[in-house]
Amino acid sequence: MESVSSNLAAVREQIAEACRKAGRSEDEVTLIAVSKTKSAAAVREAWDAGQREFGESYVQEFLEKLEAPELSGLPLDWHFIGHLQSNKVRQIVGKAAMIHGIDKVSTAEELSKRAEQHGIDVDFLLEVNTSREGSKYGLDPGSVLQAAEECFALPNVRLRGLMTIASPDPVEARREFAELRQTLEKLRQNAPDPTLLTELSMGMSGDFEEAILEGATMIRIGTAIFGWR
């Protein structure tokens, strides 16, 4: 059985190779280790191997990991990458470095309200359903520009970019990643501060190389690091 540290080393080498193919620097791609359903001990093992960015999808599990003794005092950067309902926003505001799964303006409004109450600024991404599958969360690609316009006006939150979960087929996935990149480019043309719109959170264990080729700045890897759930 492969260890978390050896899996991380293998993933980092694959990232480096994909960056070479894309003519990009490895510094342009942030690896988020998706630790949902994994133990705090597994997160600690990844931390000991040099990993600093972690992703969680379930609010209760995320809150439990924040209190885990194995992780006490460690300066981890947590990303909340799961679908976030408005009624759960208050529980995680101020606890995640970035929130990836905002797919409704109303949820962004709740995030803004709670951030304002705490006197903080919160970074978030809009989730886009580039595969147009009915079973997936995310804004329809055609509605992203309007949703972003409404989000730009909200206080105490900063729209930093877009996120997607692509189709299983690598060819389709690459097309969808390209569409997300093009959508972000359109957003920048109308944004009050285009320099904030830098992030494309796309690519997972099975398709992160295609995502890097299409401009991903954040890739979310779980299985390839921690093994099957």
Image (cartoon, rainbow, N blue to C red):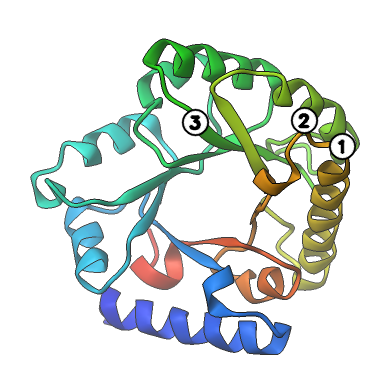
Q: Which residue is mark 2?
A: 148
The residues tagged by marks 3 and 1 sit, at their Cα atoms, a distance apart of: 21 Å
Relative depth, front residue between 182 and 59: 182
The residue depicted at 53 percent of the width and 28 percent of the height is 84
Q: Is residue 163 visible?
A: no
Q: Is residue 1 left or right of residue 111?
A: left
The residues tagged by marks 2 and 1 sit, at their Cα atoms, a distance apart of: 9 Å
The residue depicted at 78 percent of the width and 37 percent of the height is 134
Q: Earlier in the sequence, mark 3 or mark 1?
A: 3
The residue depicted at 66 percent of the width and 53 percent of the height is 198
Q: Dots 2 and 1: beta carbons under 8 Å?
A: yes
Q: Amino acid at mark 1?
A: Asn
The residues tagged by marks 2 and 3 sit, at their Cα atoms, a distance apart of: 15 Å
From the top left corner, tell me how far across and down residue 127 is, in percent. 68, 39
Please tell me whether mark 3 sits on a helix, a strand or a loop. Answer: strand
Relative depth, front residue between 66 and 134: 66
Q: Dots 2 and 3: beta carbons under 8 Å?
A: no
The residue depicted at 60 percent of the width and 33 percent of the height is 158
Mark on residue 190? 1
Q: Is residue 97 left or right of residue 82?
A: left
